[in-house]
Image (cartoon, rainbow, N blue to C red):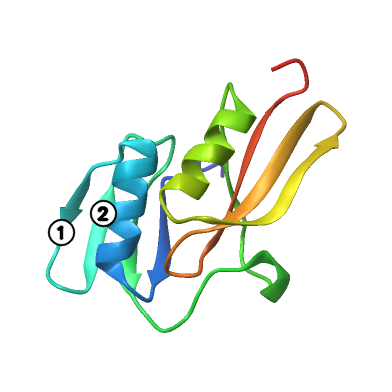
Amino acid sequence: MSHNLKLNYVELPSRDLPATKRFFEDAFSWTFIDYGPDYTAFNDQGLDGGFYKSDLTSNAAAGAALLVLKTDNLEATQSTVEKFGGTISTPIFSFPGGRRFHFIEPSGNEFAVWCLEDS
């Protein structure tokens, strides 16, 4: 029996929901819908999801899944991340087929951004 299952939604912790929302709104123009004081959701970002109030953080070194955003201009995106309060945790590096960097958003969650090698 085959069940055509696909990733549909992701939930991430947030130590400071207002700071997390503000970062993604300002840096990437994401919009959010609040569901009470402890949950906010985003959609139309390639994968829908939300942030929930938590003292925990999502970090690949601790075994969490790493969410990777795609861009056409890696350097400009890195500047935007820094401008709006993200901290670069792994500087730009090359890998077969592309380049990427990792960053920590204001609530402590790790994300990565990549682009194709010729971008």
Few, some or many residues within 10 Å of mark 2 (<14, 14–19, 20+): some
As helix, strand or loop, the secondary structure at mark 2 comes to strand
The answer to whether 93 is drawn above or below residue 119 in the figure is: below
Q: Say left or right for 13 vs 74.
A: left
Q: Percent x, y for residue 81? A: 49, 45
| Quadrant the C terminus occupies | top right
Q: Mark 1, residues whose alpha carbon is within 10 Å: few (<14), some, or many (≥20)?
A: few
Say what amino acid the circle numbered 2 marks: Ala
The percent coordinates of residue 87 (x first, y second) are: 56, 58
The residue positioned farthest toward the right in the image shown: 96
Q: Which residue is mark 2?
A: 41
Q: Which residue is drawn at the image coordinates 87% and 31% (left, top)?
A: 96
Say which quadrant the N terminus sits in: top right
- The reply to whether residue 4 is visible in this rendering is no
Q: Residue furthest left?
A: 36
Q: Position of residue 91 (x, y in %)?
A: 73, 48
What residue is drawn where x is 14% and y is 63%? 35
Residue 31 quadrant? top left
Q: In the rendered structure, find residue 72 and report the number of the disc placed on it.
A: none
How many numbered marks does the figure carry?
Answer: 2
Image position of 12 with respect to 27: above or below: below
Please provide percent x and percent y for residue 61. 72, 70
For label 1, the residue is 34
Q: Quadrant of residue 118?
A: top right
Image quadrant in which you'd find residue 29? top left
The amino acid sitting under disc 1 is: Asp
Q: Are marks 1 and 2 in contact (CB under 8 Å)?
A: yes
**Does residue 27 appear to the left or right of 113 in the view shown?**
left
Task: Label 1, secondary structure: give it.
Answer: strand
Q: Is residue 64 visible?
A: yes
